[in-house]
Image (spheres, grey):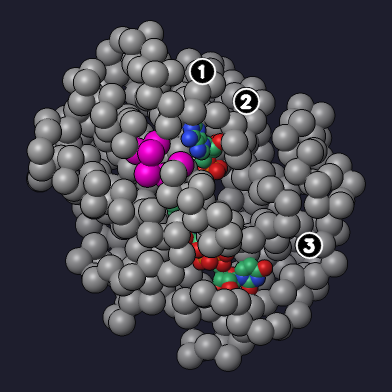
Amino acid sequence: MSRILVTGGAGYIGSHTIVELLSAGYEVVSVDNYSNSTPAVYEGIEKICGKKPLIAEEDCCDKASMSKQFEQYGHVDAVIHFAAGKAVGESVEQPLRYYRNNLNSLLTVLALMEEFGVGKLVFSSSCTVYGQAQSLPVTEESPLLPATSPYGNTKQICEEIIRDTVAATAIKAISLRYFNPIGAHPSAMIGELPRGTPQNLVPFITQTAAGIRPQLQVFGNDYRTPDGSCIRDYIYVVDLAKAHVAAVERMLQGLQKSSYEIFNLGTGTGRSVLELIKAFEQVTGKPLPYQITGRRAGDIEQIWADPSKANQALKWKADTPLQTILQSAWEWQLMIPHYHNLHPFARKTVAADGLSG
Ligand code: NAD
Ligand code: WQD
């Protein structure tokens, strides 16, 4: 049985990936410092899979502690590195925190992989590295534009750190550039728990539908898109999680075409904000209150992926229908209040936002 070390395993994408890894028969060690999550997520994973990963509470930037995990868990076949801060606005306000955490956690993991002879890394990158591409859809060959936030810059720098490390060591790597992950596991046992007021569209939509927010603000309807609202490539988090298993398998089977590969993970279809609202209204059967407001600073107009490289190489496709994805997001939203009893983190963050927990 292959053993995979997952950093940031208690987070949104990490937890869904652990479910897919355990279901595929992998042994998983999950390392997280719970800076943006809670260990209660492992109970959800156990309910889904009938088993938990091996669990360690550590800061990935702490080399001495992480070294003990590498020692304790002996041989690890691959590392999937999710652990990072991910809030764009927060990274603008606290750039040093983002550079310190996102770069140091990767540097620490790479150093320990080299030290302990672990040769395979899967890294969480982001479509943010493309900025507003001149031509759509974006392929992996599309130029990377200067990052518009410290967060985005950390992803570009991390990709460069990996490229240089792979060139100089025995480590091989795959960077996965996620487009916009949404939705939750169909069991509604795990999902995204946004801190405070959600910045991302779908958690804001579901909180509005649940009556937690009075209305959604649509950030602009004067873009050069068919309905004037921004376009993104929304990918189901479970499809995304499955791509990680495919990436690990590609590495373990020695199928990589080069020591460092990069894949876009998207659906290949761009959807507008207004389209998403309409699709969500169909799921709940009631209108979603929204208001068109001004553009959000830093937003790009439109982007979607050309995922054909991942489709072919990983034998993977993100094909869950949008309605199913939004249904899962809604079911998860309805589950969150029940989850609060188990989940002090969620209660605390919702309360911090002045809302009832
Ligand atoms: P998340 O915040 O839910 O998960 C990240 C996890 O990492 C959290 O559990 C957090 O507690 C943990 N963590 C952070 N720093 C750590 C550290 N130093 N040591 C140990 N644990 C640490 O975020 P997510 O949405 O699951 O994102 C996972 C990865 O995917 C991140 O690298 C993120 O940048 C990337 N990504 C996310 C999105 C998105 O929209 N969610 C899109 C593209 C890329
Ligand atoms: C989607 C669309 C908004 C909220 C972010 C990061 C990116 C990546 C994915 C990590 C946009 C509109 C949103 C709202 C709205 N993460 N919107 N009202 O900005 O595409 O990407 O998450 O790597 O780096 O920047 O996602 O969900 O915030 O926004 O109208 O209340 O929804 O303008 O067009 P975004 P998002």
The answer to the question of whether label 1 and label 2 lie on touching residues, with beta carbons closer than 8 A, is yes
Q: Can residue 312 be found in the magenta stretch?
A: no
Residue furthest to the right in view is 356
Give the mark nearest the N terminus, 1 or 2.
Answer: 2
Residue on which the image places disc 1: 55
Relative to 171, does residue 230 appear above or below in the rendering?
Answer: below
Viewport quadrant of the C terminus: top right
Which stretch appears magenta?
Answer: 101-106
The answer to the question of whether label 3 and label 2 lie on touching residues, with beta carbons closer than 8 A, is no
Q: Residue at x 51, y 18 (%)?
A: 55
Q: Can residue 105 be found in the magenta stretch?
A: yes
Residue on which the image places disc 2: 39
The local secondary structure at tag 1 comes to strand
Q: Quadrant of residue 342?
A: top right
Residue on which the image places disc 3: 208
Q: Amino acid at mark 2?
A: Pro
**Where does residue 353 sit, x and y in percent of width and height?**
81, 52
Q: Label 1: how many residues lie within 10 Å, few (<14), some (14-19) or many (20+)?
A: some
How many numbered tags mark residues here?
3
